[in-house]
Amino acid sequence: QPVAGDVLEHLEQLALVDFRDAEGVERLRRAIQFADQLHEVNTDGVEPMDSVLEDRCLYLREDDVTEGNCVNELLKNAREKVEEYFVAPPGNIPLPKLEERETFRQGS
Amino acid sequence: AAARGCGGAWRRAWQRGAGGPGPSPRGQRAAASSAGGGAVPVGRSGLAPWVPVVGLEIHAQISSNSKLFSGSQVQFAAPPNSLVSFFDASLPGTLPVLNRRCVEAAVMTGLALNCSINKKSLFDRKHYFYADLPAGYQITQQRVPIAVNGSLSYSLCIDNKMSQMVTKTVRIKQIQLEQDSGKSLHDDTRSQTLVDLNRAGVGLMEVVMEPDMCCGEEAAAAVRELQLILQTLGSSRAVMAEGQLRVDANVSVHHPGEPYGVRTEVKNINSIRFLAKAVDYEIQRQIEELENGGTILNETRAFDSKLGCTVPMRDKEGKQDYRFMPEPNLPPLILYDAKSLPANMNDQQVVNIDWIHERLPDLPSVKRAKLVEQYGILPEHSFALLNEDGLTEFFENVVKQTQMKPKKVIGWILNVLLSYLKQHSLTVKESPVSSFMMADLLNLLEKKEISSTAAKQVLAELWKGEGKTPLEIVKEKKLELIQDQKELEQICQAVIDGQENEVITMVLG
């Protein structure tokens, strides 16, 4: 089953991935098909597992100040900074719609 | 914590006519009484009444030294990005480590709000993109939060006189632990956003209140009581001005007997006073919109305190899909009680619900009841005492040091001292008149050495904080009551002699 255009657009916005062209979308379709094999397993009466660590003990830390004070280190990763602030665009920049994207048009 | 209830608010709107609390009202507006006795807001006369529905989502910053999942410090107003660890900045290879103090704060709060504490609760990731959320997700408790199904009781005055109080209850749906985000400073001139991550990762308790409230004043009273409870517990300092208590309101209206209407979410409410205004405005706006044939959008609106209205917020890119998933780096949070306490576990790794319950302090409602019982004051007095930081202590100190009955002392504290403090915008701690001086003054009054009027004059002098005692001021200004019978008779006679005509008129009737 092909993946609907609006679903593709929704996925790209949510995960900020770029399926790029028809080949990329086909790869997605085949990945979903592969994962669908999970439905063949009968899981009646079995509690879902969150992670292989879910039976471990959750460690509780004492409320002491042990970290921080490393602004210079952190700002080394910043492409742009103003005084000691990180700089970001004014708001989330919306992705252009699927049809408008150059890469999509090239592939189809 | 004491406010006028729904009846009063909507009746005021009706009396003022065109000047109501909402947007340009058209036509007559009448308040109809509902079966429960309270007034129900009505739009244009002749049309069916409206039932407003208000729910609240409250985020309270946990009072702790370090953050929820990292060891960086929690502090208001520090140099930007100085209280940020590698985990808070979401650098690869870092992992969350849960702060025990935050768990205890949430358990305390859950117990104080009559919740069931979930002995096993889970952490999840809530995904969305924003510059102040470096990980691209927030760690929260969406599936199984730490506490559920509680209640909060609060009081309202049902008329303008503050003499009749009614107790209301709002159900608490749940309390969950979650991370706070960083702060974005918008620089529109340079078209950029400056990001400070000091707040990123600070522990929050989200308290979800069911839509059991019906107007701004109920919402405000409920939040005020929650604030007092949190401050009494010490689980949050809950200072709204410092962002330690943030409230979002969910508002809708519907006709009695019909399903709930579409709700809007109102954000950017910075004080309890504005909360009441924002909710009332939004109720009125929705009523008007629907009566004019419009529809309500399920949107997020911001409260503009200057204009006193709500406006649509910047479009949040349509309906958000948070793609909740279990937080893979944190196993379930297990809490214990006296019965389930494991024998061979390190104390430091155990949070015992019963141990915390035994050590809960007296909640505001209990403190008020004790004050009423111990001192014979009225319930509304006890509300006023608890409403002002340090005032109860001041009152009790005065009572200890004076012969005047507490029932009389309370008048001096609430009507005289408190109004002085308010006039000069001072807290009780900053009062130039100490409880000792106050008691001294009231003793003079009680022994009938001065009159009530004179006492007020002395207080005005004391307020200047020049270090004089009440007795010194009385002597200086010659405010002593004359006790000598002969002297009094002489004065009275002199007055009568000087006003012959008036005396004759009076005697003749």
Image (cartoon, rainbow, N blue to C red):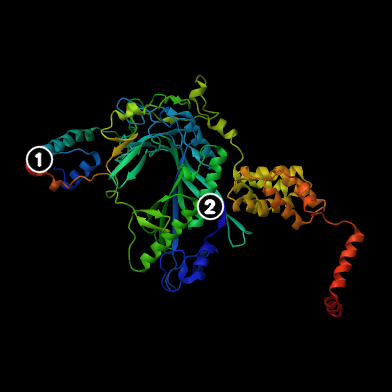
Secondary structure type for disc 1:
helix
How crowded pointer 2 is (Cα within 10 Å; few <14, some 14-19, many 20+) is rated as: many
**Nearer to me, B384 or B7:** B384
Q: Amino acid at mark 2?
A: Ala
Question: Does mark 1 fall on the same chain as mark 2?
Answer: no
Residue extending furthest toward the right: B486
| Chain of the residue on which disc 1 is drawn | A
Q: Position of residue B379 (x, y in %)?
A: 65, 52
In the rendered structure, find residue B263 and report the number of the disc placed on it: none
Looking at the image, which residue is at 63% across and 54% down?
Answer: B419
Q: Position of residue B493 (x, y in %)?
A: 89, 68
Residue occupied by mark 1: A22
Q: Is residue B11 left or right of residue B178?
A: right
Q: Is residue B37 left or right of residue B452?
A: left
Residue extending furthest toward the top: B344
| Chain of the residue on which disc 2 is drawn | B
Secondary structure type for disc 2:
helix
- The quadrant holding residue B482 is bottom right
Q: Is residue B326 left or right of residue B416?
A: left
- Would you say residue B404 is visible in this rendering? no
Looking at the image, which residue is at 35% across and 43% down?
Answer: B185
In the rendered structure, find residue B221 and report the number of the disc placed on it: 2
Q: Position of residue B57 (x, y in %)?
A: 43, 47
How crowded pointer 1 is (Cα within 10 Å; few <14, some 14-19, many 20+) is rated as: some
| Front tag of 2 and 1 | 2
**Nearer to me, B100 or B445:** B445
**Nearer to me, B81 or B396:** B81
Q: Amino acid at mark 1?
A: Ala
